[in-house]
């Protein structure tokens, strides 16, 4: 087995967003005319991988797409962003994951997600990707693929002393407790923290309390992101409140901000392993803060060349 050395490996999802803008959302059985249509690249795993790659680290994606136009297109998108695609597998058994999104003029939306080929990523593909998973500096997982596959990938990384970031999104109420044990950094947003702890998370103090509860479950550190308020950072063995504020910016579209934050965090963990987690979170806030100032998901993620030198 040849070694594959990457800085960041992401095991996760790819989704094609099919976005229609219309004056209003259609009722059941109704057909209406929209005024704009576009196709976007999404999926939490792919988004996070692409943000890390754009900041300038060697990345590989482990995922499954369909043997279809959208799958081919997505592989090209990875290549265009410098992401290694040897572990992006294509299946004839399901279509590439897709999100059909209708947005009305008031910004209200209706979304149907079909995970498709994402749910076919399993033990066989992880085994093939083992040379990459076991030698990377950082592994990142989420929950848009089978949770069992995510957990297995995290365990493979941990067995090889690889640092792990786990993003429990979309959150599931009965998360396997082993996820906490194998997470070096457990990074979630307010609503995920609420669902996982069963407590309200609407302020910095509440996020800190929820973070303490998550920390008790066995992860190394916890980050709870708080949109324009930045995030709170909690490390095992420390009880002081560490709130890391976000830069004050004019946000035009926050879609994918959480993925930009996690991709940036993975970048800093790989590139500056000895940097305090708080400082990594401060810099990830800055990167995600740039992403909210432009529309779209991956289209808004900054490249290294867009950011000042002090971010690196
Ligand atoms: P999404 O689901 O929209 O991708 P999320 O809910 O997972 O995002 P958030 O907590 O909303 O994640 O945002 C993640 C990070 O993005 C924040 O910690 C912050 O750094 C940045 N961010 C989000 N919204 C803003 C904003 N309005 N101004 C500045 N930074 C922001």
Image: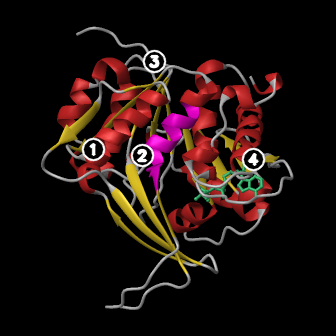
Answer few, some or many: residues within 10 Å of disc 1's Cα (few below 14, many 20 plus, some between 14 and 19).
Answer: many
Query: Label 3, on which residue?
Result: 6
Q: Earlier in the sequence, mark 2 or mark 3?
A: 3
Task: Give the Cα separation between the discs numbered 4 and 2.
Answer: 28 Å
Q: CB atoms at circles 3 and 1 under 8 Å apart?
A: no
Residue lying at 18% horizontally and 53% vertically, measured from the top left:
94
Report crowding for label 2: few under 14, some 14 to 19, many 20 or more residues within 10 A (C-alpha).
Answer: many
Of tags 2 and 3, the one toward the viewer is: 3
Which residue is label 1 attached to?
A: 65
Q: How many marks?
A: 4
Q: Quadrant of residue 115?
A: bottom left
- Name the quarter showing ligand 1: bottom right
Does the residue tagged 4 have its C-beta within 8 Å of any atom of ligand 1?
yes
Q: Is residue 133 above or below residue 236?
A: above
Range of residues picked out in magenta: 39-52
Q: Residue 167: x and y, percent? A: 51, 48
State the residue position of label 2.
Answer: 179
Disc 4 crowd, CA 10 A, few/some/many (<14, 14-19, 20+): many
Tell me which secondary structure the magenta stretch mostly adopts.
helix
Pinpoint residue 234: horizontal percent, then vertical percent: 69, 44
Residue 204 horizontal/vertical position (percent): 78, 60
What residue is shown at x 84% (from left), y 53% (from top)?
249
CA gap, disc 3 and disc 1: 22 Å
Residue under the image location 55 percent in, 70 percent down: 198
* Most distant residue in the top direction: 2
Q: From the viewer's perspective, is 8 left or right of 152? A: right
Earlier residue among tags 3 and 1: 3
């Amino acid at each position: 087995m040849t070694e594959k050395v990457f800085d960041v490996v992401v095991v996760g999802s790819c989704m094609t967003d099919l976005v229609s803008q219309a004056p209003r959302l259609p009722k059941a059985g109704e057909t209406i005319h929209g005024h704009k249509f576009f196709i976007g690249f999404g999926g939490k795993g792919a988004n996070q991988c692409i943000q890390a790659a754009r900041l300038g680290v060697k990345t590989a994606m482990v995922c499954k797409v369909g043997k279809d136009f959208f799958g081919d297109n997505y592989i090209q998108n990875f290549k265009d962003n410098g992401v290694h695609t040897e572990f992006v597998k294509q299946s004839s058994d399901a279509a590439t994951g897709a999100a059909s999104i209708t947005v009305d003029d008031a910004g209200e939306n209706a979304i149907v997600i079909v995970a498709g080929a994402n749910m076919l990523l399993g033990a066989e593909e992880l085994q093939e990707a083992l040379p990459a998973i076991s030698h990377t500096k950082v592994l990142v997982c989420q929950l848009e693929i089978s949770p069992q596959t995510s957990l297995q990938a995290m365990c493979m990384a941990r067995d090889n002393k690889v640092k792990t970031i786990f993003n429990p999104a979309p959150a599931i109420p009965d998360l396997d407790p082993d996820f906490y044990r194998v997470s070096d950094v457990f990074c979630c947003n307010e609503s995920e923290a609420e669902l996982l702890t069963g407590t309200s998370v609407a302020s910095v103090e509440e996020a800190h309390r929820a973070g303490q509860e998550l920390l008790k479950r066995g992860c190394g550190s916890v980050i709870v992101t708080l949109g324009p308020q930045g995030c709170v950072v909690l490390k095992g063995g420390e009880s002081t409140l560490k709130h890391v504020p976000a830069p004050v910016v004019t946000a035009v579209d926050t879609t994918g901000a959480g993925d930009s934050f996690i991709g940036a965090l993975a970048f800093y963990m790989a590139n500056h392993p000895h940097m305090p987690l708080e400082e990594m979170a401060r810099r990830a806030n800055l990167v995600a803060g740039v992403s909210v100032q432009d529309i779209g998901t991956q289209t808004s993620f900054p490249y290294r060349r867009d950011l000042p030198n002090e971010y690196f």
